[in-house]
Amino acid sequence: PVVAARDAYVLPGLIDPHVHFRTPGLTHKEDWGHGSRAAVAGGVTTVMDMPNTRPASFTAKALIDKAALIEGRSLVDFAFHIGVDPEHPEALADLDTGTARSAKIFMAGHHTAPAVLSDPAALDTAFAAAARSGVRVVLHAEDGGLFDLLDAWWGEPGGYRDYEARRPRTGGIAAVAKVIELVRRHGTAAHVLHLSSAEEADLVCAAQAAGLPVTFELTGHHLSFTDADTCRVGARTRLAPAIRGVRDQDRLWRAVFGEQAATLGSDHAPHTVAEKTRSVADSPPGLPGVQELATAVWTGMRRRAPEEDADAAIGRLVRLMASGPADLFGLPGKGRITPGADADLVLFAPDDTWMFSAAQVRSKCGWSAYEGWTMTGRVRRTFRRGEQVFDAATGAYGAPDGAWLR
Ligand code: NCD
Ligand code: ZN
Ligand code: ZN
């Protein structure tokens, strides 16, 4: 990081490798105009979009069609995760890695997951095929059967905390163990998304120590909320995998401070206010976060280690949110401030203290679980390929000109 003014850093544009911008088919929840404005307001200049759209993006053609819909509408550069079609897991062997940066497998079903790939034989085929084409798989690792079983308990006495605490722990641990076993068998590069429990973190770290090519992502949500918030806030913080308790959150923060996590992602997954004000059981899991991610993580980092040197802390944020994801997914010109790289830059004031309110939400969904949070650190300006795309002082946005990173 470069010190730009007495009170601000110039950072490389941040990369959010896990967003759901809902195009095509779900644009009542989010679209690229809103989603990318939220991104640049949060210092993010590159996003990687997920395939659980309608229709789901299972083919190179679907990604080309999606890019055509985005063209002229995005303030940020973008890349895609392609969905793995459960009917044709073998198709991964022929995947053109210039079209999709990685392949997404949903091992468990919920409202917004497309088709689920939980059958052991199909998973085995997918991992073998991905190893052949050299594509990285990224996984929603929860156990499908258990997920469904426990979903039925949602409204039962015993309450939200009990439900949230139990569901993901066992389902997630079983699924992460399964992923590690498949990586061991086939040598496939695998990245576990939105890791949520202490046990899962320990498992993946042990697999890494054994030399397996498996990495994991942490979300701002799992670092920012605990089951106590979930009880209080209700459906707004319902996501999959569920938010867990303080012990888990402490373990995830250890994986931030120790840089065991390869990436931080927002899992920006907007749903409408109407959907999220239904009963907890009937509301779809997911919440917005691309705008909040960097500041929420910075706020947590400073609160948990107030004595830490700010330069050291900001270096870690940049590795987890810029150079780390650029290296993992091979994003050319991104993640670093070096000669020849794209001039994606963020002016970030690390000590600004401010209140995040509903009026500042840029996502089309119009709400945030972080409303009322006192944030530390603020994005002042954001530049994409040398052009200013956001100025916090005036609230002005630049021209949408995002490019598909192939
Ligand atoms: C995501 C969504 O709504 O698309 N929801 C979620 O709870 N995380 C899907 C996903 O990432 O699994
Ligand atoms: Zn997921
Ligand atoms: Zn997601």
Image (cartoon, rainbow, N blue to C red):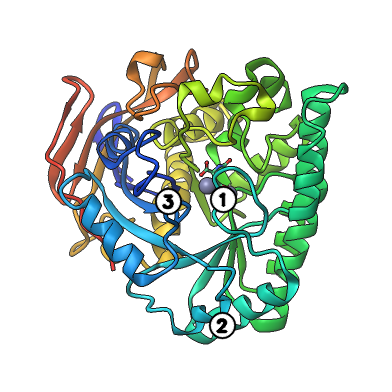
| CB of mark 1 near ligand 1 (< 8 Å) | yes
Residue 25 location (% of width, % of height): 37, 46
| Residue 7, quarter of picture | top left
Task: Tell me the CA gap for discs 3 and 2.
Answer: 25 Å
Task: Tell me the CA gap for discs 3 and 1.
Answer: 10 Å
Q: Which residue is mark 1?
A: 113
User: What type is the residue that disc 1 sits on?
Assistant: Ala
How would you rate the neighbour count of disc 2 (Cα within 10 Å): few for under 14, some for 14-19, many for 20 or more?
A: many
Residue 150 location (% of width, % of height): 81, 40
Write the residue at 60% across / 21% down.
278
How would you rate the neighbour count of disc 3 (Cα within 10 Å): few for under 14, some for 14-19, many for 20 or more?
A: some
| Residue 314, quarter of picture | top left
Q: Secondary structure at mark 3?
A: loop
In this view, 107 is above or below 368: below
Write the residue at 51% across / 34% down.
297
Quarter of the picture containing the C terminus is bottom left
Q: Secondary structure at mark 1?
A: loop
In this view, 241 is above or below 238: below
| Residue 242, quarter of picture | top right
Residue 264 visible in this rendered orientation of the protein: yes
First-in-chain label (3 vs 1)? 3
First-in-chain label (3 vs 2)? 3
Task: Tell me the CA gap for discs 2 and 1.
Answer: 22 Å
Q: Secondary structure at mark 2?
A: helix
How would you rate the neighbour count of disc 1 (Cα within 10 Å): few for under 14, some for 14-19, many for 20 or more?
A: some
What count of labels does the image hold? 3
Q: Which residue is mark 2?
A: 129
- 10 vs 68, nearest the viewer: 68
Q: Is residue 41 left or right of residue 229?
A: left
Res 54 label: 3
User: What type is the residue that disc 2 sits on?
Assistant: Ala
